[in-house]
Amino acid sequence: MKALDEKINYIEVVDINDHLIYFYWGRHKDHSEMNMRLGGGTYVIYRGDSAIVVDTMDLWLEDLKVELHEFAIHCKGHLAVYLPDDKILLTADMLEDPIWIFKFDFATPESQLAEFERMRAMDIERIYSSHCNLNTVKAGGYDKNFIKNNVNYLKRMLADAGHSDFGTKRAQDYISDAVSAGELTWWEPYAEVHARNIDTIKNIGLQ
């Protein structure tokens, strides 16, 4: 098998356009490696002397590995960017300080909570999001408690959804422990987000 592998280990280069190349390794049904039996290749996006290697959901910027992780949180197809060498996760809109916007038209609350747990299982030391506290970013970013606090906000809202007075509590009432610990910072315009989240929960019939 080794002699066969050496004979058919080759790469064909396909120029798709002036900034995209496909390195195709072929399909070889008798190869010892599954990837070679199934067939496939790797794409490279380039401009000048800079290039990104796209390998499944991993990108390479020279020697820097960039992983793309899809999570069913906030909206369909949402991607987080993970830098494994730095143990940094960039979460875009999936995590917010102080609270995040609920959307359940593509995934249930329970499935999104499970996705948060999958995120929390990653080897992360620092987290950065699009909607956050600038001082926290300057101080080195958020830790995994950022995930926990966004999870707790949803869980606590869901726990109250069956009560007759649901919708009367402020957002601050659901995240008071995180705010007191300095892990979240209340920003008054998020009162509008909280009102929207109340309506979102009511509309899925949890009351």
Image (spheres, rainbow, N blue to C red):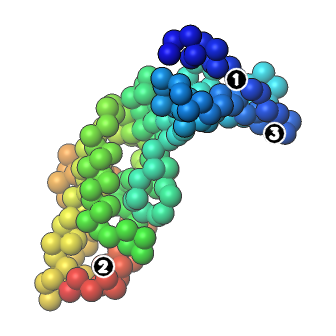
Q: What is the x, y in percent for residue 205?
A: 27, 86
Query: Does residue 192 appear in the picture of this structure?
Result: no
Give the x, y percent position of residue 114: 27, 56
Tell how many labels.
Answer: 3
Mark 1 or mark 2, earlier in chain: 1
Mark 1 to mark 2 CA distance (whole Å):
53 Å
Q: Name the quarter where the C terminus is drawn.
A: bottom left
Residue extending furthest toward the right: 18
| Quarter where residue 142 is shown | top left
Q: Earlier in the sequence, mark 2 or mark 3?
A: 3
Q: Earlier in the sequence, mark 1 or mark 3?
A: 1
Depicted 65 relative to depicted 163: above or below: above
Residue matched to label 1: 11
Q: On screen, 40 above or below 162?
A: above
Q: Write down the residue under mark 3.
A: 16
Instruction: Give the Cα separation between the discs numbered 1 and 3.
Output: 15 Å
